[in-house]
Amino acid sequence: MIENKVKKVAVCWSGGKDSCLALIRILKENHEVICLLSMVSEKDARNHAHGIQLEILKLQANALGLPLILVDSAGEYELSLKRSLSYLKEKLGVEAIVFGSLYSKEDRMWNEQVAYKSGIEPLFPVWISQTHSSKLLYEFISLGFRSVVCRASTKYFDRTWAGRYLDWSFYDEIQQTDSCVMGELGEYHTFVLDGPIFHKKIEPIKSEVVLNSGLWSLDIQTCHLLAKT
């Protein structure tokens, strides 16, 4: 039996459940996580994936105890990501980039192309078949992660879904909608507040739900980091 080589990796980071599942699986495989990498808009002071304010995203990285690298795309998303991956390889010795893609072949193909062009290996630890998405959500909740819906498409959800926690009631109700259970096609996004790989937990203090471009968005404005007992 050939053992998998332990690698120095970076994790492409949105702050949501897919990223956290990818991270915990990579850690269980004993890979060395050098940093989290998040594509952002410095102008808007938010990350692209889920619209989380950058100061809140930094608190999350603090809670995880991992370095966070913010990459401003400035309208050149792919080029900015390639440059960042090349930097991580050359300066920090990163050998692979971890993606939280689930089953979207187009998403995986794009990520693979960008990674290989940067001379770095792409890893997909949560890659599944579409029919298994429910099992992945079950695993996420069972592991003890605490996460909140930060974006919900108006095509599938009303305003009340923004700000909901991913608990067993959510698990049951999401199955009754037309959305992918894991929101793989952008039906909803999440922000993770706590879990088994968190050294501290995040407690939202102030937030509001806003409607923006067909999305009910939970704008988390203030958070506290709390010790875990």
Image: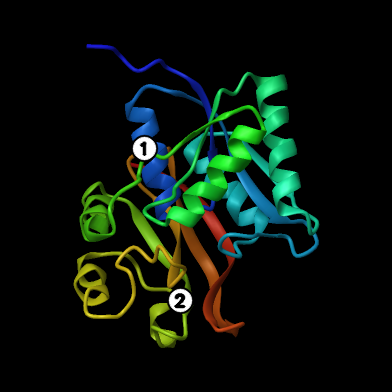
Is residue 77 depicted above or below 165 in this figure? Answer: above
Which residue is found at the position 34% from the left and 63% from the top? 182
Which residue is found at the position 32% from the left and 41% from the top? 196
Is residue 182 depicted above or below 117 in this figure? Answer: below
* Quadrant placement of the C terminus: top left
Q: Amino acid at mark 2?
A: Ala
First in residue order: circle 2 vs circle 1: 1
Would residue 88 be seen by someone viewing this image from the given angle?
yes
Which residue is found at the position 66% from the left and 51% from the top? 39
Mark 2–mark 1 Cα distance, whole angstroms, equals 25 Å
Q: To which residue does mark 1 refer? A: 24
Would residue 198 be seen by someone viewing this image from the given angle?
no
Q: Amino acid at mark 1?
A: Ile
Q: To which residue does mark 2 refer? A: 152
Left or right of 87: which side holds 32? left
SS under mark 2: strand
Q: Name the mark on residue 194.
A: none
Which residue is found at the position 66% from the left and 21% from the top? 92
Of residues 74 and 217, the one nearer the viewer is 74
